[in-house]
Image (cartoon, rainbow, N blue to C red):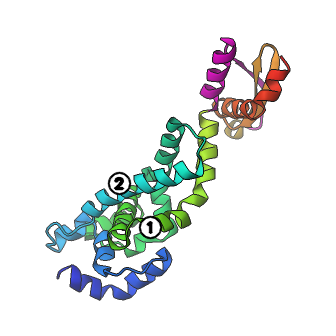
């Protein structure tokens, strides 16, 4: 069996997957190849006919298209922040989530051993296959087609990931701006700790020159501090005016 005959055999399933993706392939063999894991290729004597090279292509394409889209969408964002946001969108965890959203695992061609060990739900396999599918779309339809694909599937996650990164990086950014402006760092004060031991909620305030700049609550002190810092940054000009 070769790619042509496998694509013909799986034509109905591939058509269903095309509908989910919202893209109809001119060359269906590209989509089929994107779904062939190395374990299947080995078992069925498909030398070199797995999705690894399309994965390589898709990885580069996603970096470019998502980077370009972020550049256009957030023109005031600094280079380091754009890099972090792009990384959060194309890491294994997020790509695997995207793959699950389109039920990619159902359409994979896996070797018997990989299939038996829950390979269809492994993040490493799903994320790589997702990149391969993107590579296949690029090879079949070009840049504008992938740009449209990214707009439909990735842009809804932009603001969520950006907010997560802003909170995660808030302490260092707050310290950076205060050090630059006043050559002083803020301090963090635990205001409250409530709830049972397995479900604690911590409330923390960030204090600068005896003024509370922001307050945050979370299930850990560290996250509460980050949320307090994010709150301070959101009202930074107002807080500085109180000094």
- Residue drawn where x is 36% and y is 67% of the image: 138
Left or right? Give the position of 108 relative to 191: left
The answer to whether residue 192 is visible is no
Of badges 2 and 1, the one in the foreground is 1
> Crowdedness of circle 2 by 10 Å Cα count: few (<14), some, many (20+)?
some
Q: Nearer the viewer, residue 154 or 50?
A: 154
Q: Nearer the viewer, residue 233 or 10?
A: 233
Q: Residue furthest right?
A: 242
Left or right? Give the position of 126 relative to 66: left
The answer to whether residue 191 is visible is yes
In the rendered structure, which segment of residues is drawn in magenta?
170-196
| Mark 1 lies on residue | 144
- Residue drawn where x is 60% and y is 60% of the image: 156
What is the spatial separation of the Cα atoms under label 2 and label 1, in whole angstroms? 15 Å
State yes or no: residue 216 in magenta.
no
Measuring from the top left, give residue 206's x and y in whole percent.
Answer: 74, 24
> Crowdedness of circle 1 by 10 Å Cα count: few (<14), some, many (20+)?
few
Vertical arrangement, residue 30 with respect to residue 223, above or below: below
Mark 1 residue element: helix
Q: Picture quarter containing residue 230?
A: top right
| Mark 2 lies on residue | 60
Q: Earlier in the sequence, mark 2 or mark 1?
A: 2
Q: Nearer the viewer, residue 147 or 235?
A: 147
Figure label count: 2
Circles 2 and 1, Cβ within 8 Å, touching? The answer is no
In the picture, which quadrant includes the N terminus? bottom left
């Amino acid at each position: 069996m070769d790619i042509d005959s496998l694509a013909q055999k799986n034509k109905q399933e591939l058509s269903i997957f095309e509908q989910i993706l919202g893209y109809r392939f001119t060359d269906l063999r590209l989509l089929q190849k994107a779904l062939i894991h190395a374990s299947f290729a080995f078992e069925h004597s498909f030398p070199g006919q797995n999705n690894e090279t399309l994965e390589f292509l898709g990885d580069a394409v996603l970096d470019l298209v998502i980077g370009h889209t972020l550049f256009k969408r957030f023109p005031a964002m600094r280079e380091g922040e754009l890099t972090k946001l792009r990384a959060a969108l194309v890491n294994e965890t997020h790509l695997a989530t995207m793959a699950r959203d389109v039920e990619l695992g159902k359409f994979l061609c896996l070797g018997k051993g990989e299939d038996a060990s829950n390979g269809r739900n492994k993040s490493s396999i799903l994320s790589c296959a997702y990149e391969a599918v993107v590579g296949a779309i690029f090879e079949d339809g070009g840049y504008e087609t992938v740009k449209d694909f990214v707009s439909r599937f990735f842009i809804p996650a932009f603001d969520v990931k950006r907010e997560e990164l802003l909170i995660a990086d808030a302490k260092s950014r707050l310290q950076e701006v205060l050090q630059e402006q006043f050559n002083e760092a803020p301090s963090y004060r635990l205001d409250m700790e409530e709830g049972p031991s397995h479900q604690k909620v911590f409330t923390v305030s960030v204090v600068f020159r005896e003024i509370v700049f922001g307050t945050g609550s979370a299930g850990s002190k560290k996250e509460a501090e980050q949320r307090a810092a994010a709150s301070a940054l959101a009202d930074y000009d107002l807080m500085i005016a109180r000094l």
